[in-house]
Image (spheres, helix red, strand yellow):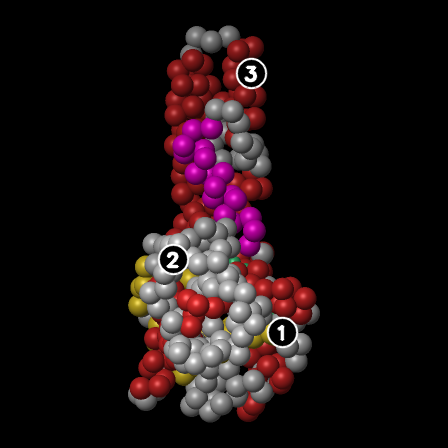
Amino acid sequence: MLIFSPTTIRSLNPQPLPYLSFSHSISLPLPLRSLPTPSKSPHFPSFHINCIDAAQPFDYESHLKNRYIQSTSLKIAIIGFGNFGQFLSKTFLRHHHTLLAHSRTNYADLANHLGVSFYADPHDLFEQHPDVVLLSTSILSTETLLKKLPFQRLRRNTLFVDVLSVKEFPRNLFLKYLPPDFDILCTHPMFGPESGKTSWAGLPFVYDKVRIGDEESRIKRCDKFLDIFEKEGCRMVEMSCMEHDKYAAGSQFVTHTMGRVLEKFGLESSPINTKGYETLLNLVENTKGDSFDLYYGLFMYNQNALEQLERLDMAFESIKKDLFGRLHQVYRKQLFGDNNGEVEKKRSLAQKLLGNGSLTEPPLDNVRQDGS
Ligand code: NAP
């Protein structure tokens, strides 16, 4: 705590001071050592300055900072304030943007707690004239929702952004339903509340500037939005929505599928987890928080997903064939010269391993015929 006597202040301002008034910053070279005892003069009652670093209305630096923040901040309206919408809003707020939200569910209390203004009615939200409208709804509900939004209440050149995990689908919907004056930025932050919990540094952020007007203000607005992710250290990847979907089906859809398969399988931690096993446990952890709607959306609205699912299925069958093919060979070898009881035991073991026994059930009768 710093305590200044009126005499110290007086040396800065020759006029008697009924109250303190500075026209500029207080960051002057004040003597910090050997402070004199507070004055007992009736004109200058003793007073204390407890903190000189708080932003004061007359603080020039804080004025500059506020002006900078205002010039770089955006009014962002999030539609779909569920899991992912809330997750994004926390970071947007840290970057001093003004956040508004609308969702099917009433999240007013939660939004209020975060510092986001919640509007139950999209008409009220759009009347606030946000710079950016960000769609973070489930893939499945996007079209129904878009058809109902009161675009006429927005400013003529609003920027529409989506964060859906598939890209061609929202791109086509935006081009179909949005007024032609609106700018369109399709994005996919390729991380979620689990994988981006501690930091976004190094995590991929894919975007496609589908339609951004030529005016400088429009270009800047889009850049300001992208800046959030850039400043968080994301790996910025500009690519077309079509390319995104091709790559994402091979990586993201497969990741989600394996995560869900392993979750159903029931992986459990043990005292002797290997690094590989830890990776599998992390995969389950990362994917189990996502809704089935999200996963189903990845499948339904990425035309490459079905092919990937079939490839996965074929790969699994092929590995089973390799395993049971080898088992079959060992089994055959032991069969010759083995007694009947042992043969029966091995046969039932093989059937157990096979599950339904349909794929490569050892053709015992054929073996006998072959051997005879
Ligand atoms: P989600 O299940 O895909 O979507 C939930 C959101 O959609 C909620 O805001 C929900 O609103 C809204 N919604 C669902 N059905 C609706 C309907 N019939 N009408 C209106 N709104 C409806 O889960 P999410 O994780 O929050 O994902 C949101 C979007 O972000 C998705 O498009 C997803 O692909 C994308 N994304 C997610 C992640 C992730 O890791 N989670 C990562 C990147 C991108 P209410 O909550 O109000 O019901």
| Circle 3: residue type | Glu
Q: Position of residue 7 (x, y in %)?
A: 44, 68
Say what secondary structure mark 2 lies in: loop
Foreground: disc 3 or disc 2:
2
Task: Quarter of the image for the C terminus: give it.
Answer: top left
Q: Is mark 2 within 8 Å of ligand 1?
A: no
Q: Residue at x 40, y 39 (%)?
A: 318
Q: Residue 153 placed where, x, y %?
A: 56, 90
CA–CA distance in space, label 1 to label 3 = 69 Å
Q: Is residue 363 magenta?
A: no
**What residue did someone put label 3 on?**
344
Amino acid carrying mark 1 in the image: Phe
Q: Main secondary structure of the magenta part?
A: helix
- N-terminal-most mark, 1 or 3: 1
Asked whether the viewer can see residue 301, the reply is: no
The numbered mark at residue 118 is: 1
Residue 349 in view of the camera: yes
Q: Is residue 49 above or below residue 324?
A: below
Q: Which callout, 1 or 2, points to the residue nearer the camera?
A: 2
Q: CA distance from mark 3 to mark 2?
A: 95 Å
Crowding near the residue tagged with mark 1, few <14, some 14–19, many ≥20 C-alpha atoms within 10 Å? many
Asked if residue 286 is among those painted magenta in the image, a careful observer would answer yes
Residue at screen point 37% across, 64% down: 30
- What is the secondary structure assignment of the residue under circle 1? strand
Q: Which residues are magenta?
A: 273-290
Q: Report which residue position mark 2 lands on.
A: 32
Marks 3 and 2 close (CB-CB < 8 Å) = no
